[in-house]
Image (cartoon, rainbow, N blue to C red):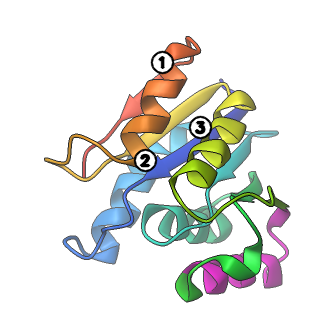
């Protein structure tokens, strides 16, 4: 059982219902929610926020949110998900990397999370060959870390 897991995924999630994401998380994240497991999540819109809320409500794992710059720089829905997790007493830490809120900052954030994880679970947008999710999964592969790819 991995002791630390990174979740990465598309920001474009409106093409599926919230129930479909809950079902995906139940099926593919639940097996990695044992005692002492720590999750790293990017704190952005889309999969990051959806998985953060699912982990908050459905598990007892430790949750760490990493942001490329500051928490205040994240989109409103992502800040709301972070606040909900914090208010529920479930958010272990928000790591503010004080970088840029553009591609280089997001890549640095993703490397930070992968470097601290035993497993990476990615939810890329089906049919989209590039982007940050693929960058993160490729980085995990380059580090010889196991990774699970679940296109949505």
Residue at 42 percent of width and 69 percent of height? 46
Q: Position of residue 18 (x, y in %)?
A: 34, 75
The label on residue 141 is: 1
Up/down of 12 relative to 128, above or below: below
Q: Residue at x 39, y 65 (%)?
A: 11
Element on which disc 2 rests: helix
Q: Residues within 10 Å of mark 2 (few under 14, many from 20)?
A: some
Q: Mark 2 and mark 1: span between their CA atoms? A: 14 Å
Q: Earlier in the sequence, mark 2 or mark 1?
A: 2
Residue linked to disc 2: 132
Measuring from the top left, give residue 140's x and y in whole percent.
Answer: 53, 24
The residue labelled by disc 3 is 32
- Percent position of residue 38, x then y: 76, 43
Q: Quick one: label 1, few (<14), some, or many (20+) residues within 10 Å? A: some
Vertical side of 147 occupied by 62: above or below: below
Whole-Å distance between the Cαs marked 1 and 3?
19 Å
Instruction: Give the residues in magenta.
Output: 78-94
Are there few (<14), some (14-19), or many (20+) residues within 10 Å of tag 3?
some
Residue depicted at 80% across the width and 67% down the height: 91
Above or below — where is 91 with respect to 38?
below
**Residue at the image point whose x is 49% and y is 37% from the top:** 136
Q: Is residue 46 magenta?
A: no
How far is mark 3 from mark 2, CA to CA? Answer: 23 Å
Helix, strand or loop at disc 1? Answer: helix
């Amino acid at each position: 059982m991995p002791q630390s897991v990174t979740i990465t995924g598309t920001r474009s999630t409106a093409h599926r219902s919230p129930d479909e994401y809950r079902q995906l998380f139940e099926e593919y994240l639940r097996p990695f929610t044992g005692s002492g497991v720590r999750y790293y999540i990017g704190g952005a819109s889309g999969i990051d926020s959806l998985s953060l809320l699912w982990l908050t409500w459905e598990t007892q794992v430790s949750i760490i949110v990493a942001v490329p710059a500051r928490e205040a720089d994240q989109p409103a829905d992502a800040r709301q998900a972070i606040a909900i997790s914090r208010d529920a007493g479930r958010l272990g830490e928000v790591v503010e990397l004080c970088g840029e809120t553009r591609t280089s900052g997001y890549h640095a954030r993703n490397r930070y999370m992968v470097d601290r994880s035993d497993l990476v679970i990615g939810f890329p947008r089906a049919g989209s060959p590039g982007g940050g999710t693929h960058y993160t999964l490729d980085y995990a592969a380059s580090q010889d870390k196991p990774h699970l790819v679940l296109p949505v």
